[in-house]
Image (cartoon, helix red, strand yellow):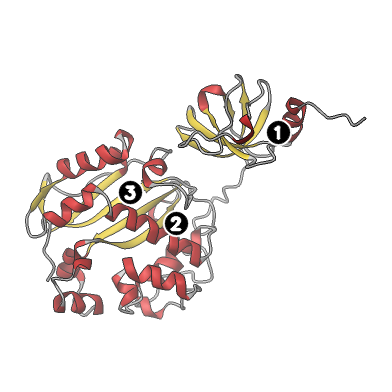
Amino acid sequence: MKSFMPLAFLLSLFAAQVSADSFTATHSCPLYQSKNKLTNPGEMMSVPGTEYEVLEMQGRATRPEWVRVKTAALSSPERWLAGRCGTLQQQNTGSDSGRCDVAGEQDGHVLALSWQGAFCELYGKGKRECDALNRSRNDERWLNLTLHGLWPNKKSCGTEYGFCGAVKQKAKGFCNYPDVPFGADAKARLAEVMPSADFNSCLERHQWWKHGSCQTLDANAYFIEAARLTELVNQSKMAQALKDSSGKMQSTANLRQLFTAEFGKHSGKRVSFHCSRGLLTEIRLSLPATLDSSIQIKHLMARDGAELRDSCPASFLVDAPG
């Protein structure tokens, strides 16, 4: 007759092998495959007193709302557990090199999105994408936010965190950087949200060698994720308000209100509006250190993220294309 180990013992055995941050369960709570849909294949529950290895967390590090942990579940072993169900123990791994050019040491990301009309008005002389805008100013694409960059950040380095790969300094002209090592699918996806990439003025090269090289995704995954995030923002009510305001005045208060109504009150300090000469030029979003292509912006912004500051006045002009 075969004997079987109790599930609680198996869970404890699996979770005891902890080398990163760990979460000790204090209550028996559901271990969700999806915390949004509240799915729990196998009706798995946490075992009080058991330590689970933490893969990621949502909310404040001192008081997480959710943690994703490794379990012994046969189906979807990586599960979400509510933060109220235990306590978090953070490990000091000593992995920070103290340098500002080492990949994978980011503590957050910033998604920077341009308002293309204002960019071309102020900085676009001689750029192919701006010549194209002037020839097709009624094209719907110019009323979308466009991707400037997805920047991994490291607080101890400030804006100096960068050039973590083979290229170690800024080139004299974006097209003087090496080609980006990505495939046709990622290149096509990027061209939809970054006019410079579409019209071959090479912004994507600078973005990869300065910023993309400082995280651990390859160029394909990195730019596909940047494009996905840009598209999600362009589907928002805030982005629609910008379209409707083309050639008119807008306010930071109104745009922030629309943004927080859609993405949660926590997002209000994690979005910023940037202006030059009275024109809106850029919107930035503060995102966590670990990005997940299956997660919507609302849930990404609910995690820990740096607060951002506006550089726009209370009211500004949303420049019309051309």
- For label 3, the crowd category at 10 Å Cα-Cα, with few meaning under 14, some 14 to 19 and many 20 or more, is many
- Quarter of the N terminus within the rendering: top right
Q: Is residue 60 left or right of residue 283?
A: right
Q: Looking at this view, is 231 or 36 the one in front? A: 36
Q: Which mark is residue 161?
A: 2
Task: Kindly identify which residue carries mark 3.
Answer: 285
Q: Residue at x 16, y 64 (%)?
A: 118
Q: Earlier in the sequence, mark 1 or mark 2?
A: 1
Q: Looking at this view, is 233 or 74 the one in front? A: 74
Q: Residue at x 40, y 56 (%)?
A: 151
Q: Residue at x 53, y 71 (%)?
A: 166
Q: CA distance from mark 2 to mark 3?
A: 18 Å
Query: Looking at the image, is 27 positioned above or below residue 256?
Result: above
Query: Looking at the image, is 249 positioned above or below residue 321?
Result: above
Q: Earlier in the sequence, mark 2 or mark 3?
A: 2
Task: Kindly identify which residue carries mark 1.
Answer: 15
